[in-house]
Structure formats: structure tokens, C-alpha cells
Image: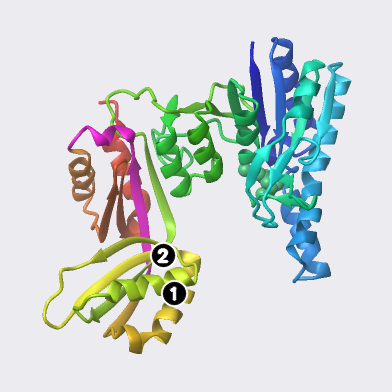
Amino acid sequence: MGLIVQKFGGTSVADAERLRNVARIITDTYKAGNQVVAVLSAQGDTTDDLIEKAKEINPNASNREMDMLLSTGEQISVSLCAMAIEALGCPVISLTGWQAGMMTNTVSMNARIKKVDTERIEAELNQRRIVIVTGFQGVNRNEDITTLGRGGSDTSAVALAASLDADLCQIYTDVDGVYTADPRTVKGARKLEEVTYNEMLELATLGAQVLHNRSVEMAKKYNIKLEVLSSFTGHPGTKIKGVAKRMEKSYISSVAKDKDISRIALIGVPNEIGTSFKVFSLLAQHYINVDIILQGIGHEEGKDICFTVAGPDLERAAALLKEHREEIRYGRLETNSEIAKVSVVGAGMINNPGVAAKLFEALYDANININMISTSEIKISVLVDKKDAEKAVQVIHDKFFSMT
Ligand code: ASP
Ligand code: MG
């Protein structure tokens, strides 16, 4: 018995049958003696469709009106879900973000939750009602509706779990957990029973589309026990917590790849103080995120600076650097989009040497060339040619997770 927050993503509530399925999961949890607050996303592609609709009318619509429009998707889901629960004979009420006390700042379309006034929700729970809350939205101090940025419903759920001091926050989605690698493409990929918040943050940043990054940060900050699981299979999912049980003897938990990145090389920049500062502050001023950076010690004729950016940022970054060539004084600019980043993530590598060596051995045995390397406490990323990406993930996965 306890207070459980359950979040259901867009695919889990996509149509009437799935909504009934979600209603069953919620009522089963309730009938087991728990208090339940459910947070829902908009059905299927509703949010995308609403954005399209807006573009048809006015491609430059204000963010305030966009919030007004996009927030309706979640309202459809919660009211329909409440109706499905009524039909199952359980007491239920649906609430908008405003009714649920989700107070945000005033940044339309990318608002941050400032606090949750839980009074109303608590009153409803005390009446033994199931409470269904719209994800992805809140209200700002001007009493305007705001939305939290794409994928924001996870964050709504975790914020509610934190404010209500919930015992567990379950994120129901269309995958049944976090895997050692993408199970659709990697042979032998297995579901992880548990991962740490830090691992999940790295994985979310690396493009594992299971959880909104901000939601994991918040869960970590408030120590909310999270669980990612499928609304379709009923299988146990992956738990995300402070300290995780390790699988077998592996020090890493997952292998990820990102094929949508590009490398920029500035060849022959002057070997003097302040050059890197010029390059990276220019990019930062234009909100271009830089990932792996490599700079050699240099020689008399100058030095080279290489770095990666997200695929969609390449053209903008290259154009900016060309525009400022005089100032930065580089010899040549080269770009390469035929690369991919492959990473291993694992809290266990902090205390166990040899993870990097094992990774490099796997790539060496497979005859795969490494272009760049970057590490953090719990992550090692290598840049390989795009054509080698799949193979690299497979051989690394085999190396760390093969049963033999
Ligand atoms: N419906 C919103 C979106 O599609 C929020 C969410 O699903 O988390 O981005
Ligand atoms: Mg989502």
C-alpha cells in the first residue's frame, strides 16, 4: 500500500482499446489498496497534428497561443481515461495542470515547473478518488497555460511524485525497460533490472528515447524511485535509483550509438592563448552545443581543433566559423558527417580499471578505426566511421555482455 504516480505515454493511450487497458492498470493498482495519481500524454500523434494545424493557420503563431492549443491534447486523454475508469466502477476525477496546481515559470512552450500546490490532489485522494492529471502543462503566475517542452509529461509525473512524496513513480511506455543495447538491432541485448540515475542521465543524453532528461534530473534530486515499464506486456520493467544492482560481472550497463552527429576540424589555428575561447564562445553565443573536443599540443605552424556537433547544427556551425575566419585565423575548415558516436555507460567503471582497454580491444579485433575518444566518470565514447557503427555496437556488446 502506498501512493503511486503512474505516467502513460502517447502510444499507451492512442485509442479507445488502449485507454481501456490503461484504465485497467490504474484500477488494478487502486484496488490493491494504493492511492493512484495518473499522468497522461496526448493520444498518439496528437501533439504533432496540433502543431501542423497551427502552421496551416499561422506559421508564426505566438508561443502563448501554441500553449493554449497544445495543452488540449492532454485534456482529451485525461477526460477519456476518467470515463473509462468510471465505466469500471471506480471513483475518479480528471484535472488539468492548472487544477492540479502545477505552477510554472512564464517561458511559453518550454516552461519549468516551479512548484506543485498539491492541496486539490490531496483532497481528492482523501476522498479515495483516483486522480488523472494532464501531463506536459501547467499554469504561470499570470494564470496562462504553459507547456513544458516536447516529451514533458515524464517531468510532470516526477514533479507530482516529488511533491506528493510518492512511494513510486512508474513510467509506462511502449518499450518494456532500459536495455543493454537497442534490442531491435543488437543481438543478445537484454533488459536491465536496475540502472542508476546517473547512468540514465547519460543514456538519455545519448539519445535513448525512454525518458525525458529533465525528469531523470528531478528524480535524482528528490530521490524518487522510478520504474520504466510497458503498458502492453505487463512485464516488470527497469528500476532507476541511486544505487543499482549490477548485472552479472559487467561494469557497464549499456552500449549506445548516435549516428546523427558531425565533426568539424579547424586545421592550422594559431598556437596562441585564447583561440579555443574564440571558437567555442562563438558557437555558444549561437546556442550550438559542442560534444567531443580534441585539441593537439600543436607545433610551430599552429594546431588543430576538432569537435563534434549534432547533425542538424553542422551547417550553421560551419557557416559561422567561415564568417569569422579572419578573427580565428585558421588555415582550413573540414567537416565530416560520415561518423557516429558509440558509447558505453556504466557506474561500475569508476572503481574498475580496464573498461577502456576492453572497449578498444573489441574494436581492434573487429578492425574498426577510432577517430576520437572522450570519457566521463561513467561513460566512454568513441567516434567511428558511420559505416562501422552497427558492427561496433555489436562487438562491444558481445565483449561486455556475452555469457561465455
Ligand atoms: N504530448 C507531449 C509531446 O508529444 C508531451 C509528452 O508526450 O510527454 O511532446
Ligand atoms: Mg514521451
Q: Position of residue 33 (x, y in %)?
A: 70, 10
Residue at left 62%, top 36%? 159
Q: The disc labelled 1 sits on which kind of residue?
A: Ala
Residue at left 72%, top 30%? 118
Q: Quadrant of residue 119?
A: top right
Image position of 337 with respect to 149: above or below: below
What element does badge 1 sit on? helix
Q: Which residue is mark 2?
A: 309
Q: Which residue is mark 1?
A: 317
Q: Is residue 340 one of those drawn in magenta?
A: yes
Q: Quadrant of residue 155?
A: top right
What element does badge 2 sit on? strand
Find the magenta span and give its range. 336-353
Residue at left 40%, top 84%? 322
Q: Position of residue 112 (x, y in %)?
A: 63, 48
Q: The disc labelled 2 sits on which kind of residue?
A: Val
Q: Is residue 377 one of those drawn in magenta?
A: no
Q: Is residue 368 left or right of residue 74?
A: left
| Residue 171 seen in this snapshot | no
Q: Quadrant of the C terminus?
A: top left
Image position of 210 with respect to 119: above or below: below
The answer to whether marks 2 and 1 mark residues whose Cβ atoms lie closer than 8 Å is yes
Q: CA distance from mark 2 to mark 1?
A: 8 Å
Ligand 1 lies under 8 Å from the Cβ of mark 2: no
**Which of pointers 2 and 1 lies earlier in the amino acid sequence?**
2
Crowd tier of the residue under label 2, counting other residues whose Cα lies within 10 Å: few below 14, some 14–19, many 20 or above? many
